[in-house]
Amino acid sequence: MIRVVPRKGEKIQQTLRRFKKIVEREGIVKEMKKLVYYESPSEIRNRNKRRVKKEIEKEARIQKKEQNGRWLKLCLIPN
């Protein structure tokens, strides 16, 4: 359980901001959304495929930038 104690002289808005940051860092909201909505196995697979594809494309962009400089790396992007 997350507990945020207001500091001496701290405004309630600042205390709420600290609470929101802690909740965000812990991933509580993301976890609750996963529990509230059912996600079928095919949706999970598709989400993971999109995540992997995005990571590969990001790596390719980085390698292309490095290739324009002094570094040269080979990249194989699966379809």
Image (cartoon, rainbow, N blue to C red):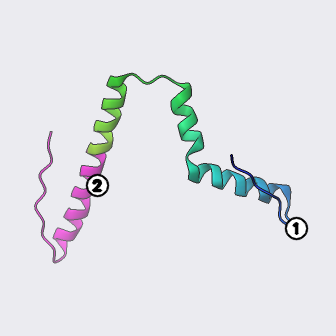
Is 38 situated left or right of 72 in this image?
right
Depicted 11 relative to depicted 1: above or below: below
x, y percent for residue 63: 20, 63
Is 10 situated left or right of 22 in this image?
right
Give whichever of discs 1 and 2 has the lower sequence position.
Answer: 1
Q: Nearer the viewer, mark 1 or mark 2?
A: 1
Q: Nearer the viewer, residue 4 or 13?
A: 4
Q: Residue 60 carries which label?
A: none
Q: Which of 19 and 58 is in front in this view?
A: 19
Q: Give the residue at x 11% y 52%.
A: 76
x, y percent for residue 2: 69, 49
Task: Please report contact status of discs 1 and 2: CB closer than 8 Å, yes or no.
Answer: no
In which quadrant of the rendered view does residue 31 lie? top right
Q: Give the residue at x 76% y 53%.
A: 16
Instruction: Name the amino acid, label 2.
Output: Lys
Q: Which residue lies furthest to the bottom in this view?
A: 70
Q: Look at the image and give the residue range highlighted in magenta.
A: 53-79
Q: Which residue lies furthest to the front in this view?
A: 1
**Is residue 77 magenta-colored?**
yes
Quarter holding the C terminus is top left
Q: Give the residue at x 48% y 22%.
A: 38
Q: Distance between the residues labelled 1 and 2?
A: 45 Å
Q: Which mark is residue 58?
A: 2
Residue position for label 1: 8
Task: Say what secondary structure mark 2 lies in.
Answer: helix
Instruction: Name the amino acid, label 1.
Output: Lys
